[in-house]
Structure formats: structure tokens, C-alpha cells
Amino acid sequence: MSQSQWNGRPTPITNTTHTQKPSGMPIHKYGRYEAVDIPDRTWPEKRITKAPRWLSTDLRDGNQALIDPMSPARKREMFDLLVRLGYKEIEVGFPSSGETDFAFVRSIIEEGAIPDDVTISVLTQAREDLIERTVESIVGARRATVHLYNATAPTFRRVVFRGSKNEIKQIAVDGTRLVMEYAEKLLGDETVFGYQYSPEIFTDTELDFALEVCEAVCDVWRPAPGREIILNLPATVERSTPSTHADRFEWMSRHLTRREHVCLSVHPHNDRGTAVAAAELAIMAGADRIEGCLFGQGERTGNVDLVTLGMNLFSQGVDPQIDFSQIDEIRRTSEYCNQMQIHPRHPYAGDLVYTAFSGSHQDAIKKGFDAMEADAAARGVTTDDIEWAVPYLPIDPKDVGRSYEAVIRVNSQSGKGGIAYVLKNDHKLDLPRRMQIEFSRIIQAKTDAEGGEVTPKEIWSVFQDEYLPNPVDPWGRVQLRSGQSTSDTDGTDTLTVEAVVDGADTVLTGSGNGPISAFVDALNGIGVDARVLDYQEHTMSEGASAQAASYIECAIDGKVLWGIGIDANTTRASLKAVVSAVNRASR
Ligand SMILES: CC(=O)SCCNC(=O)CCNC(=O)[C@H](O)C(C)(C)COP(=O)(O)OP(=O)(O)OC[C@H]1O[C@@H](n2cnc3c(N)ncnc32)[C@H](O)[C@@H]1OP(=O)(O)O
Ligand SMILES: CC(C)C(=O)C(=O)O
């Protein structure tokens, strides 16, 4: 007998209870990614306190991965959106790939679509004919960067270029020289010309070799004050943890000579699903700039998502310097340009990302909103002036142009908090806690029976049917017509009420220490045994025509239930609430 049984307690589950088994998958085919020897790494202690430089490559890396690459019209729509959002560096294409990209670059230059403070960038392989065509494409641009790449990783050296390390380095060096020569030959003084080099597949390149190639490229470009070089170290295929990626950036940042003239850029792809973390840690490790695409479009699993990165900064109180305040417009444009749908759970932008279906989340959200309102009122400010603190909502959906409408949606997983939120938000009815429980059971019965979601409209219709008189087809024993009350100096109220009772016009009279108790007394006259257990009321709006809501919990002939009354006059509202409970008791 085990000790726990001996104690009369259940046997605890230990981790030996579930024995995990080898998967049988071919793990022998995959090697472990090499760690970086950098024990004195500093990036874990760093904080991101300002926005990095951003480059959008939607029109290049994003576009090259589309089933149906963007038409000129779609490209232009995307370009204009990126400019409106505030991106200052935009990779606009691969002009030597064909007429579409070349013509697009020419069109935005010739039509004056590029603001003076925006730098366009164009990508090319390190091949002379392609470089010449690439430089031709940017003639007349105010600010333009040529971006040259060649893969440097062992497999690519062996399989794609079939060359030695020196030969691969030479491709980068010759390419850089050719870019400079063609820029010299073709570009005029009107163009502020920049240069970017990417050792493609940096993530699989030996660090010392990546450094050697970057240094050789710098020897040709000769970065100096006012003559920066962008060294972009791409995770062309994401291969390691974000922490190892950060180590590699810290290592490169420490070892690059002329570091002060280098803009160190990170270009993560999302193969392991950790591109956002990889970009953020790379910035902590010393990178200055991030290349990515809106909503993570791009090759395979995509480029890093610029929207998530920017919004992550925003949610930490750091200005991303990009305007995401109309996130649905950004989403619609991106969906149109890319002909790809954004997932409903996409961070910050998906349809469902500010929505809670489950009871405990809804309860906490409702309490969060209530607490924010109380806190703001106590300080005499609005909720926009205090720190956001609503559980389960990392940001205020309003800040990205969303309403609160979809924050709580009700289904079989929902509890009283969610339903109460809908009534408060949409109808200004702040139900007492026990009434929330009562009404949520009514909604629960509906969701259990019918499944699916109950819309706010349906919730309201069930609520009206359950608690409020139907003006067209009234139901229940009692319908109030009018009433008068008088108060004696000894505190006794006498009430006379004209009502329809069981279909007949009736005058009820009663007395008590207030209008409610007088009405309860009057109801005795028609054989209703009512006792008031709880009473709450609140105004529903401000101003002279304000309505009040009264909630009364009654024991009626031994049955405990709630009633509600809504009226501009608080006494009438409370009498209506008693009638609501009485009618429900006999329904
Ligand atoms: C990681 C990235 O996203 S890189 C960007 C990738 N984007 C694109 O490729 C989109 C646009 N590309 C294209 O339209 C075409 O590839 C073009 C027009 C540029 C070139 O087309 P092609 O001349 O038919 O060549 P292809 O695309 O097959 O390229 C392969 C050749 O280029 C060489 N090559 C590949 N990359 C590079 C490079 N960066 N620098 C120099 N040569 C390169 C290859 O070794 C191969 O040479 P080989 O034929 O001697 O074996
Ligand atoms: C050209 C480079 C920067 C690239 O797109 C990649 O490596 O993913």
C-alpha cells in the first residue's frame, strides 16, 4: 500500500505515470545548430527603447513569394500604403528580373511618387548585366540604394556556385565594384546613392567567413562618415533559436571594423516560427535596422512581420514611428495587394485577436473595463489618460481603430461576465451580480440547446423577452397603467395603482414604508405573496431625460427571481421591476 493510499488521499500523478516514447521519425537526418562561443554576451541585459530603422521588402521579398505577383496597380497601392504608414526605406523590386519590376521602379520615380525623405532600394544578383540594368532602373531617383547579395553558406558554395571560399568572396567584391562603377557612370548628382550588401544564408555561414566577406566588401565600398554601408545579415532560412541568432549578431557587431559606419541590418524569415523574437533579440544584440513585410508575407513561412514588431514596441510604450492606428485598412490593402488572407488569429490584426469567448476571460475583461472607468473617474480624467490595464487585452483595440463590439462574444464557453458586458456595453444595463447569474443560465440553456454563438442582438432579444414587457403583445398577470402615492408624516406611503390584472382593469391599493413595500402590499390583494430581497438602481444616461434602471430580487410565492424596470421616473422604474418579477414567476 502506498503512503498516499495509507493517508486516505488520492495517489498523486507523477511524471513517471506517462512514459513518452521515441517518435520513430528520422531524426538522424538532422544536425544540431552550432552555438556561438560568446560567454560575455551582453544582449540579454539590453532593452529596446527606440524604434529601429525599418525597411519594408513587401514589394520585393514579399512579392517574389506570391502565387500571383503584384500587378503594377497592386504594387502602387502597396507602395503608397507603405509611404502613408511612415516607412522611410522601401525595397521596391528586383528590376533586372523583367519588365514588370523595372517599369514599376521607373514609374514611381517618373511620376514623383517617392517623397524626398524616402529611400527606395533595389535588389540584384552579383552579375554584371543584372547590375547594369538595376542601376539603370533608379536613374533620376532622389534617394536610392542598390542591394547586392550572394549566398555564402557551405552548401551554396558547393552546390550553387561550385566555388571555393575565396571565389565566393570574390563574387561579392566584384559585384560591389561593378555597382560602384555603374552608379558612377549612370547616376547624376540628383541621386543620393547608397549601398547594401547581404551575405545570403548568413544563418548557415561560418561566422568568421561571413565577417571576412563583409570586410572585403567594405574594403571596396570604403564606408566613412557620411558614407555608410548597410550590411544585412539574413536568416534566409531560420535555423536556430532567437538567442543563438542574437549571439551571432553580437559577435558580428563586435568584430566588424568600421562598425560606426555600418548600418547592421537583420532580415529574419520565419521557418521556425520565431522570426519576431529573432528580430527583437538581434536589435538587443546591436542591429540597427529590420527588414520585413507587413503581416509577415514572404518566402515560405514568410519574412518577419513588421506590423507585429511595430505593435510590440507600441504596447511597451515605445513609438514605432509607423502609424498602425487604422489596422484594418492596412490589412485590407495588404490582402488586396498580396491576394492572401490574414489569419483571424494574426497578432494585432486578426479578426479574433481582441475577442474573448470564454467565461473567465470575459469576466476579467469586464472587471478590467469597470476598474479603468472607476480609476479614471477618481482621478477626474478619461480612460485614455491612464495606463491600459484590461486583462487579456495587451492593447486597447481602439488604438488600432477597432471598436469594443467584438471584444466579448458569447457561446457555450461563456459565463455571466460576458453576457453582462454585452448588456452594459450595448444597453447601459449594469446587472447586479446575482441577476447576471440568473440571466446567464437562461442564455446557457440556449447555447447548450442550439450550439454556436449568440449574437449581442440575440442576447438583447432574449433579455427583453424574459424581463421587459412586450408593448405589442404583453404577457404575464399584471400590466401597470398608472399610479399615485401619498406619504404620511409617520413615513407610511399609500399607493393606488391602476393596472390590468389577468386581463381585467383593476385598482390595487396598499401601504408600506416606501412605494415598493406599498406595492408589494397591494399585490397581496390579488393573491401574490411577494417579498423583496434585494434592490439596486442606476441611471442609464446623463441629462434631464435620463432613464433609470431598477433591479429587484423578489421571493414570489416562494420562488426567487429578478425583475427589471426602466423608466425616467425612479419610482415607476422600481414598480415595473416588481411587475417584471411577478410576471416571470407565473410565466
Ligand atoms: C534569398 C532571396 O530572396 S534572393 C532573391 C531571389 N529573388 C529572385 O530570384 C527573383 C528575381 N529573379 C529572377 O527573375 C531571375 O532569377 C533572374 C532574372 C535574376 C536571373 O535569372 P537567370 O539568369 O535565368 O538565372 P537563375 O535565376 O536561374 O539564377 C541562377 C544562376 O545565377 C547564379 N546566381 C544565383 N545567385 C547569384 C548571386 N547572388 N550572384 C551571382 N550569381 C548568382 C547561380 O549560380 C546560377 O548560375 P549558373 O547558371 O551559372 O549556375
Ligand atoms: C536577398 C536577401 C536579403 C534575402 O532576401 C534573404 O536572404 O532572405
Image (cartoon, helix red, strand yellow):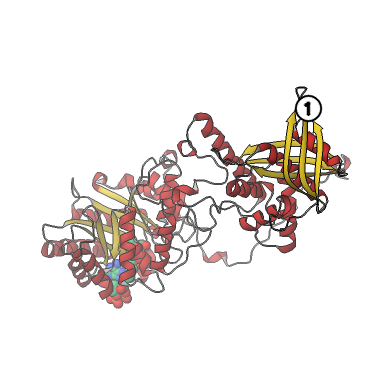
Task: Please indicate whether residue 586 sits to the left or right of residue 49 in the image.
Answer: right
Q: Amino acid at mark 1?
A: Thr
Instruction: Report whether the residue tagged 1 is closer than 8 Å to ligand 2.
Output: no
- Secondary element under disc 1, as helix, strand or loop, is loop
Name the residue at 25% across, 62% down: 172
Task: Please indicate whether residue 114 sits to the left or right of residue 270 in the image.
Answer: left
Image label count: 1
Image vertical order of residue 479 relative to residue 333, above or below: above
Name the residue at 75% across, 51% down: 441
Q: x and y percent of residue 394 in the render?
A: 52, 46
Nearer the observer, 467 or 345: 467
Image vertical order of residue 577 relative to residue 463, above or below: above
Task: Please indicate whether residue 198 sits to the left or right of residue 27 in the image.
Answer: left
Q: Quadrant of ligand 1?
A: bottom left
Q: x and y percent of residue 209 in the render?
A: 32, 56
Q: x and y percent of residue 324 in the render?
A: 40, 52
Q: Is residue 281 visible?
A: yes
For mark 1, does the 10 Å Cα neighbourhood hold few (<14), some (14 to 19), or many (20 or more) residues?
some
Image vertical order of residue 575 relative to residue 454, above or below: above
Name the residue at 43% across, 55% down: 327
Nearer the observer, 313 or 468: 468
Nearer the observer, 264 or 17: 264
Q: Is residue 151 visible?
A: no
Task: Please indicate whether residue 327 sits to the left or right of residue 447 in the image.
Answer: left
- In the picture as drawn, the residue positioned furthest to the top comes out as 490
Q: Quadrant of residue 547?
A: top right
The C terminus appears in which quarter of the rendering? Answer: bottom right
The N terminus appears in which quarter of the rendering? Answer: top right
Circle 1 is placed at which residue position?
Answer: 492
Q: x and y percent of residue 145 in the render?
A: 23, 58
Nearer the observer, 347 or 176: 347
